[in-house]
Amino acid sequence: MAATNELLIQNVFKEMLKYKPSLQKMVIVDEDEEEETLDPRFLGDLIIRNFPWPIGVELRRLFSASMRQLDRMRLDQIFKTIERSMQFISFLMICQLWKDTKEQKLDLPESFRKEFSDRILVLSMGNYAWLIRAIGTFMQEEGIKWFISEMSENFDRKFYNALDFWVPERNEIGHYQINLTNEDIEKRCVEYEEKLSCILKKLAFICKYKLVSVREIKVIHPKNQKARFNHLIDLLSSSDSGFKAQELEETKYAESSSVLLMKSLKTIDEYLNLSPLVIDTHSEVIDDKEKFDIKKDIFLYTKFRGDHLMYVGTEVTEKCDLRSLHDYGILVDQFKDMLTTITGQ
């Protein structure tokens, strides 16, 4: 019998190879074996580093030594991993819909606008599933090309149904409405790991893209020459939170203080801006007592109430009030623009 996580790691890695063949170099060949063997110790870390951080950090927890027992902790982490995956993917879809609606004047159905307005203010597992299905269906029916082209071939009715499975299960397990026996927990851990594997395989294409945070953009403009823009960025994918800083010098420039999903680190031409749904507080200077509660982390949007944006951290577990961020007002304005653009209100 395969060890905990082993089949999941092998299945997801093999699917990632289809989109990023360069990962093949990490396959370890045992000279005593007739076939190549995939070492889960290395491949697990490789999967973590090639998924965007909000998903990768949950996989890091799931693959950790403390999660190897088929107990309640592991069951909860399986749910947490799929919930964060759904949250992140829904944010990608929302940001493209927002951008395309603003630029191309898409004619969104009134029923969609109203439903979106009701669901986006307080997010939940059910809302992530609805957003993914509704936006995906609309884009397909309208023949609109995805920024992430692989979505069109991977997001189908079967995939949407697989996500819908988790909605009542998450409500049941997440809110501790039932008491599970140890036997029930063990069975669900095995069953749900298999279902998680299927969904992660459908999302394996994301390894082709780079999640980055634009920390700073400097203008370089020598005399009698065209200006160039030096982007100081952090690559938000790692087996730990020590994100790798890089510089990218271009004749064009991206949006500053933003989290971007890029097709390549070689050019700034093609990217999807995920702000204000995904934000990075690592560059915030804690220069005031009001900022002492700010934690440096990658945060994902969860609620909007009374002009107050609320976020959940990817590493920090305590709640953080981010209203003292220097650019908080800009984040609120961006969120309101998204609401107005998509809902028409």
Image (cartoon, helix red, strand yellow):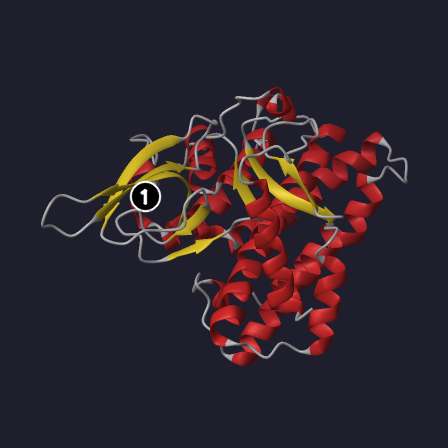
Q: Using residue 109 as the reference point, say whether residue 214 is left or right of it.
A: left
Quadrant occupied by the C terminus: bottom right
* Closest to the observer, 340 or 211: 340
* View extreme (left): residue: 224
Q: Using residue 240 as the reference point, say whether residue 27 is left or right of it.
A: left
Above-or-below relation of 157 to 326? below
Residue name at image x 58 percent, y 38 percent: 299
Q: Using residue 114 as the reference point, say whether residue 253 is left or right of it.
A: left
* Closest to the observer, 17 or 291: 291
Neighbours of disc 1 within 10 Å: few (<14), some (14-19), many (20+): few
Residue 29 appears anywhere in the view: no
Residue name at image x 31 percent, y 57 percent: 269
The number of callouts visible is 1
Callout 1: SS: helix
Residue name at image x 72 percent, y 47 percent: 303
- Residue 162 x, y percent position in the rendering: 67, 58
| Residue 298 image-quadrant placement | top right
Above-or-below relation of 71 to 13? above
| Residue 115 image-quadrant placement | bottom right
Q: Which residue is mark 1?
A: 24
- Residue 1 x, y percent position in the rendering: 59, 34
* Closest to the observer, 233 or 55: 233
- Residue 230 x, y percent position in the rendering: 26, 41
Q: Using residue 237 as the reference point, say whether residue 61 is left or right of it.
A: right
| Residue 50 image-quadrant placement | top left
Above-or-below relation of 206 to 97? above
* Amino acid tagged 1: Gln
* View extreme (right): residue: 178
- Residue 155 x, y percent position in the rendering: 55, 64
* Closest to the observer, 268 or 181: 268
